[in-house]
Image (spheres, helix red, strand yellow):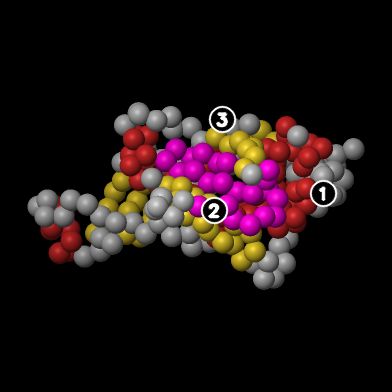
Amino acid sequence: METCIFCQSNGPFTSISHIIPESLGGALSPVAPPGITCDGCNQYFGQKVELPALASFPFSFYRLFNSIPTKKGKMTSISATLGRIYASGIPGLLELAPRNHTILEKVMTDEITSFRVVAEVTEPLAVCRMLLKMGLELLAKHLYDVAVSARVQDAIRYARSPTRGEHWWFSVYANPEDVVEVHQGLQKGIPSIEIVERGGVLCSALLLPGITTLTPLERCNPTPLNPDDALMRLIWAVC
Ligand SMILES: [Zn+2]
């Protein structure tokens, strides 16, 4: 008997999906076999969690730099100090739509040669729940008994139906120089995900080239982060 890890409904289920969604370039990532997540939960996560999460840092950045189009085939874009930055269709190559004519002229005459983008997690709750879903599916694929044990039930519930006011957290390490290196072929450009143990706590580590996230799959206090490391950020999700 197949039982959905998120809502405990019984199968058979038909949907098979990549643990790292294709919208994050996960076409080559492991597949969550049927029997882990029911069709209803998959649909729920796709619409209510994945959609808003993809519009937020760090996923928006990853999609932008890798020119991964939306499901409707549109190129992603984000706002920057000089205007709007669009994916060009070629990974690593970006297009700028300048905010005004003055900026356009300064760019054309090389007076402006760099720009800033705001790397803010605008949808921390959706991003956190999406990270949890990916981690829990991977856990269920490899360690099914652990995925249905009491140990990760808080994480399962937070991913599928968090209660108002409830917190979870994850950390993001993003280095713009690493992102650029990926496109110079110095780093591998394929996303991957793994289950790791940190201080006795099960976590999932998602490695998007240039961006790493760590998400605890058990309720715990945030790990002490190195305060000198400006590239590491702790993000709280609040329902
Ligand atoms: Zn379900």
Residue located farthest toward the right when viewing the structure as drawn: 1
Front residue of this view, candidates 38 and 59: 59
In this figure, which residue is indicated by the disc labeled 2?
Answer: 224
Measured in 3D between alpha carbons, the distance from the residue under mark 3 to the one under mark 2, in whole angstroms, is 33 Å
As helix, strand or loop, the secondary structure at mark 1 comes to helix
Q: Amino acid at mark 2?
A: Pro
Queried on whether the Cβ of the residue with tag 1 lies below 8 angstroms from ligand 1, the answer reads no
In this figure, which residue is indicated by the disc labeled 3?
Answer: 28
Residue 198: percent from the left, percent from the top? 62, 43
Q: Earlier in the sequence, mark 1 or mark 2?
A: 1
Which region is colored magenta? Answer: 200-225
Residue 213: percent from the left, percent from the top? 53, 46
Residue 150 badge: 1
- Say which of marks 1 and 2 sits in front: 2
Is residue 227 at all visible to an observer of this figure? yes
Q: Amino acid at mark 1?
A: Ala
Measured in 3D between alpha carbons, the distance from the residue under mark 1 to the one under mark 3, in whole angstroms, is 31 Å
Please rate how many residues cluster around mark 1, counting C-alpha atoms within 10 Å: few if below 14, some from 14 to 19, many from 20. few
Q: Is residue 167 left or right of residue 191?
A: right
Q: Earlier in the sequence, mark 3 or mark 2?
A: 3
User: What is the quadrant of the C terminus in the image?
Assistant: bottom right
Q: Earlier in the sequence, mark 1 or mark 3?
A: 3
